[in-house]
Structure formats: structure tokens, C-alpha cells
Amino acid sequence: MAARISIKHLIPFTIPSHLSKRSLFSSYSASHQSKTLEFLDSCQSLAQLFQIQAHLIITGLLQVQNPSFSCRFLNLCTQRCDVEYTASVFKCIDFPDTFSVNTVIKAYACSSVPHSAVVFYFERLKNGFLPNSFTFPPLMSSCGKAGNLDLGQKCHGQLVKNGVDGVLHVQNSLVHCYSCYGFIGLARQVFDEMPQRDAVSWNSIVNGYVKVGELVVARQLFDAMPVRNLVGWNVMMNGYLNLNNPGKCLKLFREMALRGLNGNDATVVIVLTACARSARMKEGKSVHGSLIKVSKDLNLITSTTLIHMYSRCGRAEIARLIFDRMSVKNIVCWNAMILGYCIHGNPKDGLSLYADLLSSRLQGTEKDHVKNMKQGDGDRVLPDEITFVGVLCACAREGLLAEARTYFGDMSDLFGIKPNFAHYWCMANLLADVGLMPEAIKTLKDIPAESNLPLESALWFELLGSARFGRDVSLGEQIANKLIEEDPKNFWHYLLLVNIYAAAGRWDEVAQTKKRMKKRGIERTAGCSLKDLKEIVDKMTET
């Protein structure tokens, strides 16, 4: 798809002063107008869009009260241009109809400024706009994306006022919107009051319960669905996966396969991730074999997920074969392979692959060179913060303190990456492992506030679950306890200890630590929720 254009490309919409819009329009034959419509329907590029735009301006077809031209061109703009350009085109239409307004609302809903859809809607109401049932699904979607319940309820009132609250696709949008907010009770109320439901209705309410973690209710609704489509199966499987039950996810996948339903790319990623988390390499290989039978050329996402699966199952050499056969690689697949070596395989191979990443993309190590690459070379792949988590973890496992200090410095000095808690944690483990416990404690205590990585992050399962990078958890436990001794009121230090115990499966210690927190009156930090690692979604970064 061609690059999207912005408002700076907009040609002024003007008509020669000696001609009226209607005289211009009437001067063109029906066959000429028909030809213009064919151009609109067959537009394939920005260059063609500009040509059509110029033609519509010169002929006056854009400004006359004929939606055949203005609506189709506006719809083209939503596909090829940014939302600001689309809105500017809309302002140049003298007689915008309901379809045109709905098109702009949808464009805003799909943009990075979804709340603007609501602003635009109420502006059009002041100009006499009469909404229909197709106005509200994108409007409710924009409220959900903006995360504003007040706006959602306000728009809910509007659709009731306009008498479309009984329309199926409008009701579906309400279920989806309230589910996005986590107000599953409101979503269920709308769902229960629906006189008829389709697959979208059922999938939306199941997904709503999945999002709030109520998998029992979600499964009951899933089983009650009159007809299940692939979306529903994926939603339910992903729910089990995200709540750390890969076994049930795979069981559901087998049931789906027995029913003769073929999965899509999303299904493959879900199933392979479940195999990775439960170390079911045999089942993962079976899925891999099925993919090869269908097509030898696997896409980027599927290949990256396979790399992660084989690495987690202890077969980094197979993961490397897949990696080497990939014709296109982005930083996500590089990270999957580097972390596969650094955390689950041979750390030295991970450091070697990191060197390959730099040598294949960097011609030098000067800061200016890296800066120029970031600005002007879209084909180059540069390491990111995830890459350095793997690199520093490898150094910790191998006891390479000098190398770790160099890599840690390169992050900010060479690549402009601010270290986060995961990087400091790797350094602290390495320092403690070589007998520099005071410096390890100081490293964690002196972490800048803006560098904190939430301890519920998916990466923590990989780091803490590696149990002192392949040995035991005593070192991590010792570091966390030292932090608690020096600052016994710091909630984050207790949270770190809880997650270290959880990663090691020491649930008695998890419970004891929580009791100690309660006894000492340690309260949660604002914006933080205490979760055991068994509840954390271990998505890593391949998806």
C-alpha cells in the first residue's frame, strides 16, 4: 500500500469565478460522469488519487450535491491519507450527506485521536446532521479506544435518543464498548436484552469476560454459542493462554481441529505460544509440520513464534535454523533468537548473534553514524531495550562483568536507550555473583524513577523464571531481602521478592511474604497491582 499523505499535499478547492458549480456539473455528459466514477472505483495509488482530486476540482463534481462523487472520494482519502487530510476534504464538500459524516467518524475512530470522532459528531449535530444506525458503531468504538466511560455513556444516550438502540450492529458495538472499559455487568445487560444475536454478539461478550479474567463464565457462554466461528475459538484459546493455562488452550485447539475447523495466523501464534509455555515441543513440532505442508514460506510472525517455541523447549539449534532461513528479519525476530540463546540456551551463542546483528548492520560505532541510521535508513535493524536484556542476562550467566559494563554503557551512549529495571536487575545479579553485593544493592537502590519496569511485565517471567540465570534463587532472594532491610516500607521491594518466589514455584514463601506485608502495613503503590507471576501474561515480545 502506498504511503499515506498529509494535509500539506491538499490542493485548494477552487472553481473559476465565471462558472457556477451546477453549470459546471451539468456541462458534463452522463458518460463522462460515469467514467469519473470508474476512476474513483479503480484508484490504486496516491498519484491516481491526486489526478482524480484535480479532476473533481476542475469539473466541480466534488462540490455539487451528488454523493456519488464526494462520498467515494472521501472514502478513498480514508484509505490513502491521514485523518487530518480526510477531515479537510470533508470541509470542502458543500453538501455532505450522512454517509460522508459517518466516513469521517470512522476515520477518526481508526486514528491515533479516537476521541476526535465524538467531538466531530457533536459538531455536526449543531449543523443539522441526522445520524443513522451506521453512525454509532465507529462512534462507540472510538469511546472504547479513548478509554472514556463518560463519552461512551453520552453516545449511548444519543443512540437511544435517535431510536437505533434496537439495531443489532449498534447493540454489538455497545457490548464491545462496555467490555473495553471492563464494565462487564453493563455489557452483559445489553447482551441479555438483545432480541436477537449473531456471532459478533457472542464473541464480544465472551471476549469481555475473558478480559476481566472470568474464564468460567466465558467458557459457559462459549459452549452456549449456537454457531462458533474461528474468532470465537481464538478468543477463548487466547483467554486460557493469557491467564496462564496453556494446557486448556491446547485442549481447546484439539477440539477445534476435531471439528474440522482450520485455524488462521492468529490461531497458529496462540497455539505455538501455548506449546512454548508448557514445554510441549512434540505438539509444537506437529503444528510446525502442518504449516510446512501448507506453505514452505512462513510469514514473519509465525517464524518468530516458532523461534520462541523451540528456544523455550531447549532446542535453540532448531530455532536457529528457522532464523537463518528467514528472508526478512526485524528486531523482534532478532530479539527472539538472541533471548533464546541468552536465557534458554548457550549465552555465548547469544552474544555472538548480537555481534552479528551489529556487524551486519553497522559499518562503524560512531554516535553520529548511529544517529544517521535511525533517521534515514529504514532497512537497518538496531538493537532495542529487549536486545540488551538478553545480552546482559548472557553476561550474568557467564560472569562477564567487564563486558556487561561495556554493553550497559553502549545502551545510552551509542544507541540512546534508557536502561529500565530489567537491565539494572541483570547487572545487580552479576555484581552479586562476583562478590560485589554492596554495589549490587546500590545499583538497584539508585535506579531513576522513570527507569522502573513494572514488575508485572512479561519479561519478568523470563528473567526471574531463569532462577539466578540457571542456578538457584538464593541470590535474587538475598538481593530483595537486603533491599527490604534498608527500606522496610518500600512496596516495590516486597513485590520483587514475591515475584522471585513465584517464579521458583515457592508458593508458601509467597504467602508468607504477603502476610508479612499485611502485618507491617505495607500498602500498594498507586497504580500498581500485586500479582503472582503465575498470573502474569508471559507474552514475551514476539507478538
Image (spheres, rainbow, N blue to C red):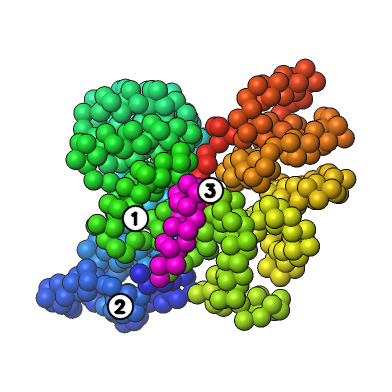
Going from N to C along the chain, the mark reached first, 3 or 2, is: 2
Cα gap from disc 3 to disc 1, whole angstroms: 37 Å
- Which residue carries the number 3 mark? 540
The label shown at residue 103 is 1
**Secondary structure predominantly adopted by residues drawn in magenta:** helix
What's the residue type where badge 3 is placed?
Answer: Met
Determine the image quadrant of residue 205. Answer: top left
Q: What residue sits 33% from the left and 52% below the top?
A: 288
Q: What residue sits 38% from the left and 55% below the top?
A: 302
Magenta stretch in the rendered image: 307-327
Q: What residue sits 31% from the left and 64% below the top?
A: 297
Q: Is 455 positioned to the left or the right of 292 in the image?
A: right
Q: Please determine whether, in this image, residue 180 is positioned above or below residue 516.
A: below
Q: Is residue 157 visible?
A: no
What's the residue type where badge 2 is placed?
Answer: Gln
- Which residue carries the number 2 mark? 48
